[in-house]
Amino acid sequence: MYWSIPILVLLALVVWILASPLRVRVRSDERTLSVSLPGLAGVTLRPGGSLVLLRIRVFFVRFTLDPLASRRRKKKEKSTKPEKKTKDKRKTGRSPAQQAGLVRALLRAVRIRHLYLDLDTGDFSLNAMLYPALALVRTPRIQTAINFEGRLFLDADFQTRLGTLLFIAITHRIKHKPSNKNTSSWNTMQPIFWTRSQNK
């Protein structure tokens, strides 16, 4: 009886994670990329240390990690050891068109809360061509501008749900399940054997 309580708590936590909004924030002025589940956890990627730093928050606990530091240590250890041959990775059996369809379906599940882009490509003629193009995509949530002063500013806030992304990935995998090549090759060869046996 008592074991059902932690299971229910765990299930409630999983449902909360899947149903909670997942927010992705990009700011070029702060040079940060943050991914967060409001009220639960968050990860912020910003320059620092050797190259980047991860600032992680889980509930009320905050800590910082340098992910490249451990990799450098592993590379030093591997340099002293002989390299082992790695086996070739198996192919997923999905065509590029199917993979592109999955990416499009996932992107459609992402909602733009707001996006502000102030861009200067450094090319006067290209700026002039981009000005009417960016004006066409302006909405109350999407604001774009072209400047000729060398500024580049991006402030984007996207939102989706982990449950939605997981559902799209599972349904796409079921819909585009790779066929068995062995059975298909046997089916193509079967009429040949049949015709040969008839001729004999």
Image (spheres, rainbow, N blue to C red):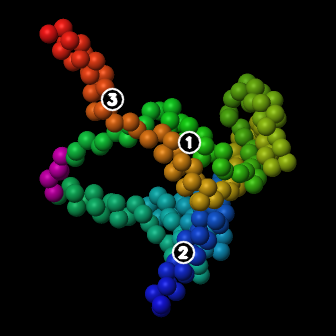
Amino acid at pointer 2: Leu
Q: Can you tell which quarter of the image residue 120 is in?
A: top right
- Residue at x-position 28% and y-position 61%: 74
Task: Tell me the crowding category of disc 1: few under 14, some 14 to 19, or many 20 or more residues within 10 angstroms, Cα based.
Answer: few
| Residue 69 x %, y % | 38, 64
In this rendering, is residue 6 above or below 169?
below
| Residue 61 x %, y % | 55, 80
Tell me the quadrant of the picture where the C terminus can be found: top left
Q: Mark 1 points at which residue?
A: 103
Tell me if residue 61 is in the magenta stretch. Answer: no
| Residue 29 x %, y % | 68, 55
Q: Can you tell which quarter of the image residue 50 is in?
A: bottom left
Amino acid at pointer 1: Val
Magenta residues, as a range? 81-85
Q: Is the magenta stretch mostly helix, strand or loop?
A: loop
Q: Name the residue under label 2.
A: 11
Nearest to viewer (mark 2 / mark 3):
3
Specify the label residue 184 is tagged with: 3
Instruction: Measure the C-alpha gap from mark 2 to mark 1.
Output: 29 Å
- Residue at x-position 50% and y-position 72%: 64
- Residue at x-position 64% and y-position 65%: 19
Instruction: Measure the C-alpha gap from mark 2 to mark 3.
Output: 42 Å
Q: Which is nearer the N-term, disc 2 or disc 1?
A: 2
Q: How many labels does the image show?
A: 3
Specify the label residue 38 is tagged with: none
